Amino acid sequence: MTWTIKSVLNWTQEYFVKQHIDSPRVDAEILLSSVLQCNRVKLYVEQDKPLSQQELNTMHELVERRGRHEPIAYILGCKGFMQDDFVVSPAVLVPRPETELLVEKAAAIFQNERIEFLDIGTGSGAIVISLLKLLPNAYATAADISSDALAVAMTNAQNLGVADRVKFVKTDVYQGLDSQKFDLIISNPPYIPNGDIDSLDEDVKKEPRLALAGGVDGLDFYRRIITGADKYLTSDGVLAMELGIHQSQAVATLCREAGYTIIKVTKDYAGIDRDIFATKEQGKYANKILELK
Ligand code: GLN
């Protein structure tokens, strides 16, 4: 038989259903449009078009990878975040839509300011690069323990035109950083409790454990970031971090214990406490933090 766009999509969709892929139709369409280098609408306009043998072979390879629950972003080698396409590889966490909120809210606090900030656990660089684009007068240091992740982030900084405003350093949280004060320390740290890693979706388990596992209670990196911040934060500097589910109270307590009196937890679109912003009393940015929605 002749394989057409329509029959390939239908076959792939059924195969993905059997493999328990969450969005079987959409994934089939994304992979086929990448093979044919066209947009998804065209798959419908040209649904009776036959595929060449080479196109079929390429599609087959991608479908097998997706069938083994490799994240679509790793298969395509890129992921959209904010306004841009970021290069991604299995060395980095795939940027999540909810992390856009952390970037947008941090940008709202520092609008038009000439700040220097530190991104801990930069991964693909999605946070640091997007924030640099929103804050054209800002400069950043982006830190990660993984050299492979730093290489991905550097590529993205170059592709997206901010390489001249960001310095990449290999660190373990603060260990390895030169002494310097920042106006903002931002992070989406690994926050999954170690014991929950095994029950994550198969797709998520393909992402680097280094970027996910946050210790027994998932809070290890918050402890290290918060208790070590004094040395790296200006007196009115701000801590901004993404939170895992059910972690807002514990992280707020850690901030309070470390002397942060202005603390704001904000929710994501699902109504889950997702981000925390903290500064010391009467800091320059205290009002902006309290105004966050
Ligand atoms: N948001 C990721 C997930 O739950 C976890 C990322 C992280 O640990 N920071 O899939």
Image (cartoon, rainbow, N blue to C red):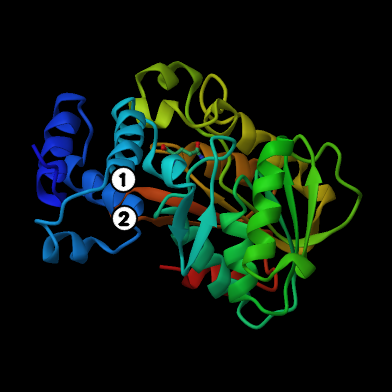
Q: Earlier in the sequence, mark 2 or mark 1?
A: 2
Which residue is depicted at the point 22% across and 44% down?
A: 28
Q: How many marks?
A: 2
Q: Position of residue 200 (x, y in %)?
A: 36, 25
Mark 2 nearby-residue class (10 Å; few <14, some 14–19, many ≥20): some
User: Which quarter of the image is occupied by the N terminus?
Assistant: top left
- Looking at the picture, does residue 280 appear above or below residue 69? below
Q: Residue furthest bottom?
A: 112
Q: Name the residue beneath numbered marker 2.
A: 36
Circles 2 and 1: CB distance less than 8 Å?
A: yes
Residue 288 is drawn in which quadrant? bottom right
Q: Residues within 10 Å of mark 1 (few under 14, many from 20)?
A: few
Q: In the displayed image of the protein, which residue is found farthest to the right?
A: 179
Rendered position, 218 above or below 283: above
Callout 2: SS? helix
Q: Find residue 268 and report its horizontal and vertical position in percent.
A: 35, 55
In the picture, measured across the screen, residue 31 lies left or right of residue 110, that is left
Dot 1 amino acid type: Glu
**Label 1, on which residue?**
55
Residue 251 visible in rendering:
yes
- Quick one: 138 or 216, which is closer to the camera? 138
Within the image, what quadrant is residue 237 found in? bottom right
At which x and y percent is residue 269?
30, 57
The residue that appears at 14% across and 56% down in the rendered structure is: 49
Name the disc covering residue 75, or none: none
Left or right, 201 with respect to 126, comes to left
